[in-house]
Amino acid sequence: MNLKIENTSNAIIMFVQEERLDAHNSDEFKKNMNSHFESGQKNIIIDLKDVRFIDSSGLGVLVSGFKNASTRQGTLKLSGLQSQVKSMFELTRLHRVFEIFATVDDALDSY
Amino acid sequence: MKNNIKLNITVPGQTRYLSLIGHIGENLARAVCACDAERESLAQKLNIVLTEAMVNTIKHANIGNPEKDIQINISISDKELIIRIYDCGKGFNIQDVGMPGIDADILSERGRGIYIIKSLMDSVVYIRKQHCNYLEMRGTLNKS
């Protein structure tokens, strides 16, 4: 899957450069995310501005990342949610779980 | 003008075809709906419902067996949408599925698919037959 990674002093940013985050690519995304946690990263921002569609598998992987970050006393934040993706978070009540920002810069400013 | 479209699709039970099926659903909605606002809403709905139902069939009914095909029937008119997804696998009990945040931990990584389908469609049933089962989802469409 197409991912761009940027390191900043506060967090790693994972730009998901895919139209869909679904059951087909979510396992690969999870492995990639976990590899950053295992290498010592605590804070991750996931930017979804290119993602037009997310399914329950994509949501599940983000939840797994959230839990992983929490157990390491870190954070997993989201940015750039398009309207359909935001609707899925609201439908499943996950908008109450995650910190969601309009842009990556807003997410970085929150640290 | 009447719009009655019936599609019958058979695909291998593999997640690599989710995007294809999702796009077919979106294009179908755009072909049927005359009104812009309704069109995009229905397109999103079809994309989500078809994706979730297909994943559910792949993972639970066909137990991840990529050799098993999945058959999808979509019938759409001005008033009603009916989707059936057939499997000839083990099947599953739709009542056993709880929703994270309601009857399961909200931080559960699984279990949202059927809830999402039920939230977006007017009725969702799983019919078990002797050799094949199907998940039937129905929705009423607004007149445009």
Image (spheres, helix red, strand yellow):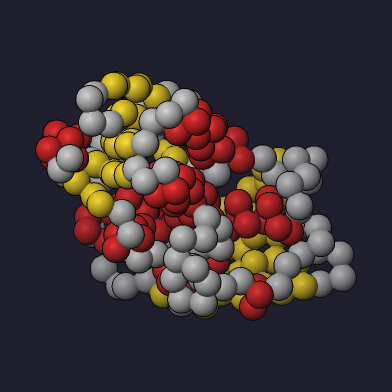
Place of residue B25 in the rendered image (x, y in percent of width and height, measured from the top left):
46, 50
Of the pair A59 and A87, the residue shown nearer to us: A59
The residue sitting at 73% across, 59% down in the picture is B61
Q: Is A71 situated left or right of B33 in this image?
A: right
Q: Is residue A42 above or below residue B27?
A: above
Query: Left or right: where does residue A47 sit relative to residue B78?
Result: left
Nearest the viewer among A56 and A36 is: A36
| Image spot of residue A79 (x, y percent) | 24, 41
Name the residue: 59% across, 35% down.
B16
Query: Can you name the residue that lies furthest to the right here?
Result: B130
Quadrant of the rendering where the C terminus of chain B is positioned = bottom left
Specify the quadrant that holds the N terminus of chain B: bottom left
* Percent x, y of residue B32: 37, 56
* Residue B129 visible (yes or no): yes
Taking the spot 81% from the left edge, 72% from the top edge, the residue there is: B129
Asked if residue B134 lies left or right of residue B143, the reply is right
Q: Residue at x 42, y 39 (%)?
A: A20
Q: Is residue B41 visible in the rendered structure shown here?
A: no
